Amino acid sequence: MGVEICVEGLTKSFGHQVIWQDVSLTLPAGEVSVMLGPSGTGKSVFLKTLVGLLKPERGSIRIAGTDITRLREHDLYEIRKLFGVLFQDGALFGSMNLYDNIAFPLREHTRKPESGIRRIVLEKMDMVGLIGAEEKLPGEISGGMRKRAGLARALVLDPEIILFDEPDSGLDPVRVAYLNQLIVDLNAQIDATFLIVTHDIASARQVPDNIGLLFRRELVLFGPREQLLTSDQPVVRQFLNGRMQGPIGMAEEKDAAQVEQELAGLDDTAGAVVTPRLLPSPGIVRPPRWESIAEREGAHA
Ligand SMILES: Nc1ncnc2c1ncn2[C@@H]1O[C@H](COP(=O)(O)OP(=O)(O)OP(=O)(O)O)[C@@H](O)[C@H]1O
């Protein structure tokens, strides 16, 4: 059913460079959340901190009741088994075919016989639409297929939480649409807690239950999708509308007077629409939470 992740007062720095500070949010069990933010605001660092690959200076991350920031390496290893991670490029081993890549975590972390491994690998390959591609090498397939292979590998240990680092990067809009549908379908099927880092606003609008935005070392907002999509905060509107006018600059932070001048005369509520939610494909049995989602969607229709 997925587990809740409760982050409180989290701060991460490298030397004197504060990446973000005092970040607090709850990723509800079984729900899909998206984290947005301009480049370099520390979204990938956030994902790595959640899996315990990076240590925060302050704050807590409670997963299934345990604060993982206080765990020793051995106990962290156990907690990490709750996670599946889809890295940007799929992070596949180039010399192994897809079957062996996807079987890898099972061979490393379990003592299952090859017959059991085969059943699981083929089941996950089927879930992501890769049946028939078992013998292919990562270099022989498209970027979209590599992402799906990375996803199948993230699924083999039946994770409670799946982290996606820019799953749509480098894909054409049609492949992104297929991948989004796959993410929504998988979430309905396995009911794990999903966190997706993305720059793709169209995906952020229609896939998640919740959206957060990191900016200037802070979590500006985190909450139900509708809350962010209809927010009138200038940084949120600028990001969602992908425009230059607003607090987000090219590299340097803009000063307040310049931002005020840019925003004067702009209709800052433009585009504050709640796009319909992407639903699981027909035939997929939806977990009970979809009833309340359908109600919420109805209220916004
Ligand atoms: N291991 C590290 N040591 C020092 N600095 C790091 C390390 N990892 C990340 N950083 C710095 O942390 C900042 C945030 O990086 P991160 O990759 O998390 O940003 P991001 O929001 O994911 O960016 P993008 O959207 O471009 O992928 C960057 O300035 C980066 O240089």
Image (cartoon, rainbow, N blue to C red):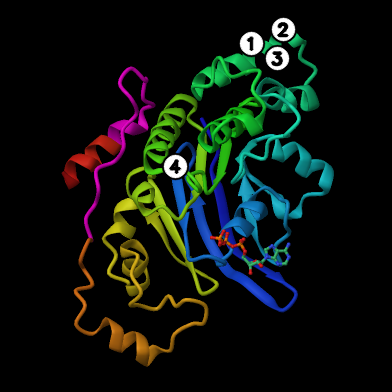
Q: Which residues are magenta?
A: 272-292
The residue under label 1 is: 119
Evaluate if marks 3 and 1 touch, with contact meaning CB atoms under 8 Å apart.
yes
Residue situated in front as seen by the camera: 105 or 97: 97
The residue under label 3 is: 117
Identified by mark 4, the residue type is Val
Among the two numbered marks 4 and 2 on one chain, the one whose residue lies closer to the N terminus: 4
Q: CA distance from mark 3 to mark 2?
A: 5 Å
Identified by mark 3, the residue type is Ile
Q: Residue at x 70, y 10 (%)?
A: 116
Q: Is residue 251 above or below residue 82?
A: below
Identified by mark 2, the residue type is Ser
Circle count: 4
Are there few (<14), some (14-19), or many (20+) residues within 10 Å of tag 3? many
Are there few (<14), some (14-19), or many (20+) residues within 10 Å of tag 1? few
Give the number of the disc on residue 32.
Answer: 4
